[in-house]
Amino acid sequence: MDLLKKTIEEEGVVLSPSVLKVDGFLNHKIDPILLDEIGKEFAGAFRNLGITKVLTIECGGIVPAFTTALYLNVPVVFAKKAEPSTMRNPKTCRVHSFTKNTDYTICIEQNTIHEGDRVLFIDDFLANGQAYLGIKKLVEDCHARLVASGFCIEKAWQPGHSILKQDGFPFKVLASIRHMSPEEGISWNYDTAETE
């Protein structure tokens, strides 16, 4: 997606060979025009899969999931990273964050995803695939079906892409990074950015 790549090049900050700062437009301060286009792109890719819910994890995936759900005309659910006292019947799963080097519990209220739902997972980054695996488990625990996934940005040298490919579900990456460094900037990977 050219608009996303252009924005990353102009406003993203490569902090290290594994950390890209995009909080100026994607996951803290939000560029509404860009996120609207992201939602259109994901919705167009998955429109024919009978999606009934869009699911993400707080907080970086919420806005792209929302705009995608808006164009698919389905509800969006976000998994919380801590179990609130107001949840009466939560489904939970432990997920490891390599960026923060910590484990956390993601959870959803059981009645937000129903048996038979066809779920689309949307997230801001695909790296090690741990968020995807956690979401997949939550969906399965709700007796629903994860049918596809979409990611705004991929770090292609990390194992997430291979994990999704092995699972065999359709997925789409909008901006796939082959390599990055503070000195050299970003090299794009054009081979893996299409729906699989």
Image: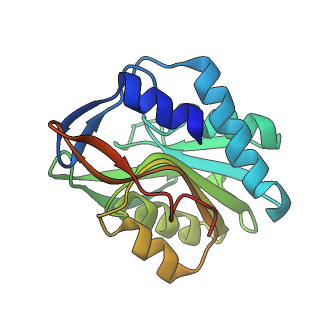
Image quadrant holding the N terminus, namely top right
| Residue 193 seen anywhere in this rendered image of the structure | yes
Please give left or right for residue 123 compared with residue 28 in the image. Answer: right
Q: How is the image coloured?
A: rainbow
Judging depth in this view, the residue of 169 and 87 nearest the camera is: 169
For residue 184, what is the image quadrant? top left
Q: Residue at x 37, y 22 (%)?
A: 11
Q: Up-down: is 85 above or below 32?
A: below
Please give left or right for residue 121 compared with residue 23 in the image. Answer: right
Q: Position of residue 76 (x, y in %)?
A: 66, 41
Image quadrant holding the C terminus, namely bottom right
Q: Position of residue 75 (x, y in %)?
A: 73, 41
Q: Residue at x 38, y 19 (%)?
A: 24
Q: Up-down: is 110 above or below 66?
A: below
Judging depth in this view, the residue of 13 and 85 nearest the camera is: 13
Q: Residue at x 42, y 75 (%)?
A: 163
Q: Position of residue 71 (x, y in %)?
A: 79, 37
Judging depth in this view, the residue of 138 and 46 nearest the camera is: 46
Judging depth in this view, the residue of 195 and 51 nearest the camera is: 195
User: How many numbered badges does the structure rendering display?
Assistant: 0
Residue sitting at the far front: 184
| Residue 88 seen anywhere in this rendered image of the structure | no
Q: Position of residue 92 (x, y in %)?
A: 41, 58
Q: Residue at x 53, y 47 (%)?
A: 56
